[in-house]
Amino acid sequence: MWSKLALLIIKNRRLLVGLLAIITAFMAWKAKDVEMTYDFAQVVSPDDPDMVYFQQFKKTFGEDGNVLVLGLQDSSVYRLGNFNELRLLTDTLSKVEGVSGVLSVTKLIQLTKDTANQRFATAPIFRTFPQTQRELDSLMRIVNRQEFYKGQLISPTTGATLLALTMDPKYLNSSKRQAVMKNILGHAERFTKKTGIKLHYAGLPYVRSTMTTKVAGEMRFFLMLAALVTSATLLVFFRTWSAVVFPLLIVGVAVIWCVGTIVLLGYKITLLTGLIPSILIVIGIPNCTYLLSRYHYDYRISGNQVLAMVRVVRKIGLVTLMNNTATATGFFVFCFTNIAILYQFGWVATLSIFAAFFISIILIPIVFTYLPPPTPKQLEHLDAKPLTKLLEFFDYLVLERRGTVYGIALVLCALGALGASRLQAVSYMVDDLPKNSSVNSDLKFFEEHFNGVMPLEIVVDTGKKRGILKLSNLERIDRLENYLRTQPELTSPISIVTFLKAATQTFYNGDPSYYRLPDNSERNFILSYLARSRSAAPAASDSTAAGADSTRTAPAPAPKAAASMNDKLLRSFTDSLGQKARISLKIADIGSRNLDTLLLTKIQPQINEIFKGTGMEVKMTGTTILFTKGNEYVIGTLRNSLIHAFGLVGLIVLILFRSIRSVFFTLLPNFVTLLLTAGIMGFFGIALKPATALIFCIALGIDGDNSIHLLAKFRQEMAANGRRVRAAISTTLSEAGTSMIYTSIVLFVGFSIFAFSEFGGTKALGLLMSASLLITNFSNLILLPTLLVTFEHGKDETIDQAMIKHYDDQYHEEDDDLELNLNRIKVKRGGPHPPTPSPQAEGESV
């Protein structure tokens, strides 16, 4: 089959090049429509009970992760001129397209008591803007008496303040988000230039926007860097520009097909799929390296380009396909998950790897049979002395020092197991960004002054209509909120309880000492005031209505009587039936392990104690909790994917060699590689999280193809030399070892580029994959041959039954050329004189 394929490719060179050009042009045309994803990656199954509950929460109360906050701590902001600039900034931001509302100290609303009408009224604290510093100071004293805002909009300990921008979800989840964020940041920077006051930014919209921008930038950066480093590596190996330019052209075509595939499948560029083009260059170049090094080896023996290239396709075409299949397996296992971002990554990577193989197996023979033959200088890499000495050393260890090899392997495995036992599964909301990034430094600002900005929600379901207004239920919620205030990782909660406390304070003429829940004697008066305020709500001014809208999802909704019972504001605190209440908090980015400890060992026991025997259901939810659960879900899914990967690689080996022992020989060294990689993670404190858990499946696929390569060559040599194991091992190491080391070097250098990423997960991918590739040279070039020498006797199997059979290396046998139908082929071309061709290669020109 492979002989016929080789002849078909060479005979139809122009037709195939034209066909590939048409397909590439079509893929390039589709690739121009590729888009970045702007949705928050959902990694929890849509059917998961917590995800279902969270979706119901959003339908009832609205989004919890659409608030962008701008913070500052500078006493000069309360100078009249700077305060005026802050007011102008607030007004300007409220008019930005994509911003639903803005809440800041300059737009605060206070609740007042209308004794004549026995209702609450609302009015802005800054009705007219102060004209003097004295007037401003007087109004700020009123602001500081509003207990409702303390810890929400103004830090009671440091005096820091913030602006809360509620973003329109329609803009957040579309390509318009970047323009909106650019507009907001532009206005903020102008404020800083005018006043000299530094602003800090946080909130999920800002984090997501920053990461999207960086993903797009890194995709371009790594494409160029991957092309550069692989070019340098190829030039060092082959010492000719043709062996650099054309492999890069081939993987460039594969990258175009990859991006076109993303569009054809209806996917978008994510943090993971954005890595595939660069990974494809890194994985695709070894295909070319493998084929070219074998072509040079065969050409030096035969002296005929076409004959050498046909023999390359015939002898290693299937092996190369199986190698790529093993590599693709590491990605394909992600297709078994129901996590969209992993599923898409798996499909696109798998299809792209096979596309890269078929492009290279077609174009390499075509291009290099058109080009002049390699010169003797270009063939010198086949006799590289350092590489030869290294392989001779490996041969010595395998044949003469097997006990030493096993001893070292056992010690390394013990160390790997010890390191792996130290692995911790922990992740942070922004841990993919570097610690010294502006996002992390700004996040520290908000954690220092406001205890954090990540959303956390608690829903209290009384099970009864209007049950939330029952005083005993409100008191239980108040007890829970008082406990939450003692936790340093949490902001002060905001809920119907805090709103009623503000109403009580207003009822007593704004006295801060009355910021509490109404007692039984006060309850009816205050609720009647609120009821009358509701009837007056339609008459509220436009500015009041605007204020209600701006506070709906901000950290501190304004306590306005006129709009308090309005449906829009009611949904911020309770559902339409008055059955459920929402307690909103913000939390520091303390990591998944600390978050689990806080929720499960501190908050949940308090909830159980406070609401025990009431029949009320209290549940924690929110984007932060779903993010943490998503990480645990992904890690668990990837564990299953790794098991699937082992099974698929084993199945490939079983089909290929029809030998159970070969499956053992393949999987054991690769298990050692993964164990040592896990040990490195444990010793160096690299946490197990979705980005690092991916590495094991990918590494297994890439390392598995090295095992298949070596086993295939070993079986060929066993059949050729009468099944003498030691001789077969020596020949296998000297011949297959060269291309395996070349491939490992290319992959090592290629994956190393990801160490320059700003994303922690991508950086870990580069470093750990590079470490894995170094380890796999020990596993596959020393441990695997040692196992073969120990356990393989060549007596129990019929090698010819395997899909990979031995092909004779005696190039001057007439039957071999007749079988290939190349007995009359000769390449006529000017240029360097090749070695003298074999007699049967003379004849008709191609």
Image (cartoon, helix red, strand yellow):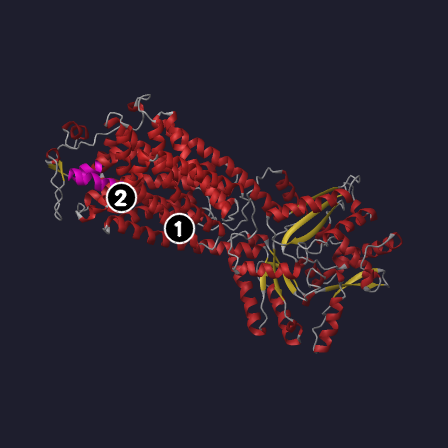
Q: Quadrant of the C terminus?
A: top left
Q: Is residue 301 magenta?
A: yes
Which numbered circle lies on residue 752?
1
Extreme right residue here? 521
* N-terminal-most mark, 1 or 2: 2
Q: How many marks?
A: 2
Image quadrant assignment for residue 413: top left
Which is the main secondary structure of the residues drawn in magenta?
A: helix
Can see residue 501? yes
Residue 662 percent coordinates (x, y): 37, 28
Q: Is residue 99 left or right of residue 542?
A: left
Quarter of the image where the N terminus is located: top left
Which amino acid type is marked by label 1?
Ser
Alpha carbon separation for disc pair 1 and 2: 26 Å
Can residue 24 be seen by looking at this rendering?
no
Residue 528, by quadrant, is bottom right
- Neighbor class of circle 1 (other Cα within 10 Å; few <14, some 14-19, many 20+) is many
Q: 521 or 372: which is nearer to us? A: 372
- The disc labelled 2 sits on which kind of residue? Lys
Q: Which residue bears the numbered disc 2?
A: 389
Is 85 in front, or is 646?
A: 646
Side (left or right) of 254 relative to 538: left
Q: Position of residue 594 (x, y in %)?
A: 62, 48
Q: Secondary structure at mark 2?
A: helix
**Is residue 124 rendered magenta in the image?**
no
- Image marks 1 and 2: residues in contact by CB distance under 8 Å: no
Residue stretch in magenta? 289-310
Q: Position of residue 353 (x, y in %)?
A: 37, 40
Q: Is residue 731 left or right of residue 114?
A: left
Query: Residue 286 location in percent, x, y?
Result: 32, 43
| Residue in view at x 70 percent, y 62 percent | 542
